[in-house]
Amino acid sequence: MFKTASIRSTRLLKLMVNHASRRHITGRGGTPINTIIVFVPQQEAWVVERFGRFTRILEPGINFLAPIVHKVAYVQSLKELAIDVPQQAAITMDNVTLNLDGVLYLRVTDPHKASYGVEDAEFAITQLAQTTMRSEIGKIALDTVFRERETLNVNIVEALNKAADAWGLTCLRYEIRDMKLPKKIQEAMQMQVEAERKKRASILESEGIREADINVAEGQKKAKILNSEAFKMEQINNAEGEANAILAKARAKANAINIVAQAISSKNGVNAVSYNVAEQYVSAFSNLAQKGNTVLLPANTGDVGSMVSQAMAIYTNLSEANKVKQTLSETKEVKEEEQQSQPTNINVNPESLDTDTHTLFSSELDSPDKPN
């Protein structure tokens, strides 16, 4: 008898577990029906009431409830939820009307507050997101909306969390999904973009022209510097060449003069000079006959011998004058050496000498440069 009763109870328990293991059956209010043994899924929280009053929150797993006494009043999902924020109109600080919509990501952190703190948490947070977005859009200009979109999203999330804390919700992030502008504003922005692009193109073109002009100017500058340096080196080289040529000609002329002087001083040198002068005389007249030149000639142009004799006489006079000048110079040097070799102090008693000797001695002392 006891064995039959235990078998029946085991079968009944299995049926109850199989029935409870199925997905919970919801009642009229959308909440599961109390089946004594209930299984709460992961990432869900079931709010249980006893005779209409909150008693506890069921954790994920198997839970036991008393029939009639306990009731599952609310089921809260602890997963992250994405809620669409409907499109709405907002006016910026510079009086531009925008149509915006977005997506709000939130999570239930306190199932008790989410169940009893607000009637419809999703509707409440959606309305709050819309009003907050309108308020934040009104604080900034249109250009700032495009540049600081991320900052705008952060400000909306911070404002939502201040109010959603009492509802047991936490806003994770808010994203502006779509933004529509009036047609005239779009056309004005398009014109602005085109003008900005033309401006950049003009700037780039002018910068390119400037760089090209700078490169050309630098090239011309370097070319002029190189040309001036080359001209300078050319002038220096020409001057050095002319100087060397002048020195070489002078040395050659000096050597030629020395050779001529040696030849003249040799035996029959005068005759050779006479012959050379006569030859040059004849050659000069032959050149005059070939060219139409106007020159002054001496009266006796036909007497070659007299011209040669006159030239030789001039040469002889110049030679003798040079010899006399050289002799006088040598005599002066000898006298200066003799004066330097004689004593400086001479004590002479004029009274001990006769008048002629005194006079001669005085004249010699007064004129030391005269030859003896």
Image (spheres, helix red, strand yellow):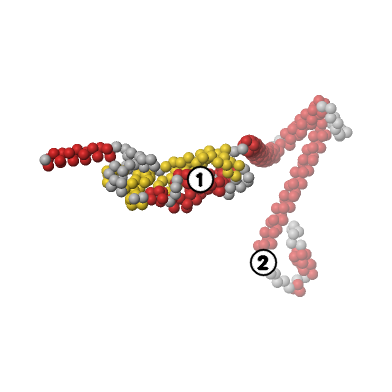
The foreground one among 127 and 361 is 127
Give x and y (percent) for residue 203: 64, 38
Number of numbered discs visible in the structure rendering: 2
Q: Earlier in the sequence, mark 1 or mark 2?
A: 1
Q: Judge from the rendering whether residue 178 lies leftward or rightward of residue 246; answer left or right.
A: left
Considering depth in this image, is 312 or 258 the residue closer to the camera?
A: 258
Residue 196 visible in the snapshot: no
Mark 1: few/some/many CA within 10 Å (<14, 14-19, 20+): some
Q: Amino acid at mark 1?
A: Gln
**Mark 1 touches mark 2? (CB < 8 Å):** no
Instruction: Point out the frontmost of discs 1 and 2.
Output: 1
Q: Is residue 272 left or right of residue 52?
A: right
Quadrant in which residue 191 is drawn: top right
Q: Amino acid at mark 2?
A: Pro
Q: Give residue 343's mark.
A: 2
Residue 368 placement, left or right of 176? right
Q: Where is mark 1, residue-wise?
A: 127
The answer to which image quadrant residue 13 occupies is top left
- In this rendering, the answer to whether 365 lies above or below 156 is below
| Residue pictured at 82% horizontal, 31% vertical | 304
Q: Residues within 10 Å of mark 2 (few under 14, many from 20)?
A: few
Q: Residue 247's x, y, as percent? A: 67, 41
